[in-house]
Amino acid sequence: MSYQGSFRVWRGDDQSGGLVDYRVEVNEGEVVLDIIHRLQATQAPDLAVRWNCKAGKCGSCSAEINGKPRLLCMTRMSTFTEDETITVTPLRTFPVEKDLVTDVSFNYEKSREIPAFAPPEGVAPGDYRMSQWDVERSQEFRKCIECFLCQDVCHVVRDHEDNKQHFAGPRFLMRITELDMHPLDAADRREAARTEHGIGWCNITKCCTEVCPEHIKITDNALIPLKERVADRYYDPIVWLGNKIRRRST
């Protein structure tokens, strides 16, 4: 079964652009990325779109479909009605390169700001030991495919460009949480999370969790625990008193 679907696709670059209407053939079982490829093949050969695996594992084909951040390759056409106009636009939070391709270098810059895993001194790699509970607690975070949909939907940077310098975003706050939860990581992550990466700016709206294609519970299992760890360290009055007593005794 096939039909002619109505699509509005954003065309342009960082200087100018707008939505262009197309009628494209839709076949049973297809996803939005199939339609974009057919559009390239039949009507718009110069349409720019980033993609790679077409299996929901590389995170390359991130875009906004009807205003919601999604993967083009994981959004089935069967979720829309035949008479519905489907709007495909680039990720709004990042600068447009061309058409549906955006410059996501902001995310790689944030990634480089986070120090790598720091094993304890005197412990050789083959001697690392940790419980299965500790393994499972952070295993969920390693499912991240870095599609940056959570970064795109987070209103802290989506609506406030000036915040990008001081806020790492949910993907990299989740990375900090993963390292901070690791029993063999010797670095103190909480100070940097508070002062450099802006964990206090997150107001746990769960929008990042809602768009995650890997169904990672970013807010509940990463951001809230990290906020609690930071609060315990710096704002718990009992911890504060203990630190005062400890400093006086040394």
Image: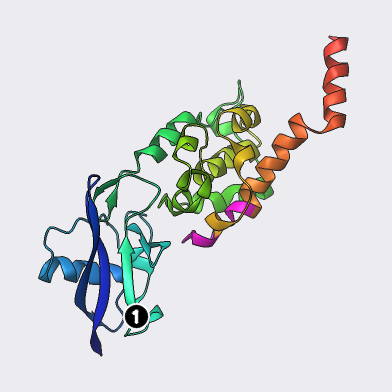
Looking at the image, residue 141 lies above or below residue 164: below
Q: Can residue 131 be seen in this view?
A: no
Residue 212 covered by magenta stretch: yes
Whether residue 38 appears in this view of the structure is: yes
Q: Can you say whether 57 is above or below 146 in the image?
A: below
| Residue range highlighted in magenta | 210-219
For the point 17% across and 59% down, the residue is: 47
Q: In this view, does 189 lie to the left or right of 235?
A: left
Q: Mark 1 points at which residue?
A: 84
Nearer the observer, 160 or 210: 160
Q: Where is residue 12 in the image (x, y as percent from the top left)?
A: 21, 53
Q: Quadrant of the N terminus?
A: bottom left
What amino acid is labelled 1 in the image? Glu
Q: Quadrant of residue 80?
A: bottom left
Residue drawn 48% across the image and 42% down it: 160
Q: Position of residue 243 (x, y in %)?
A: 82, 21
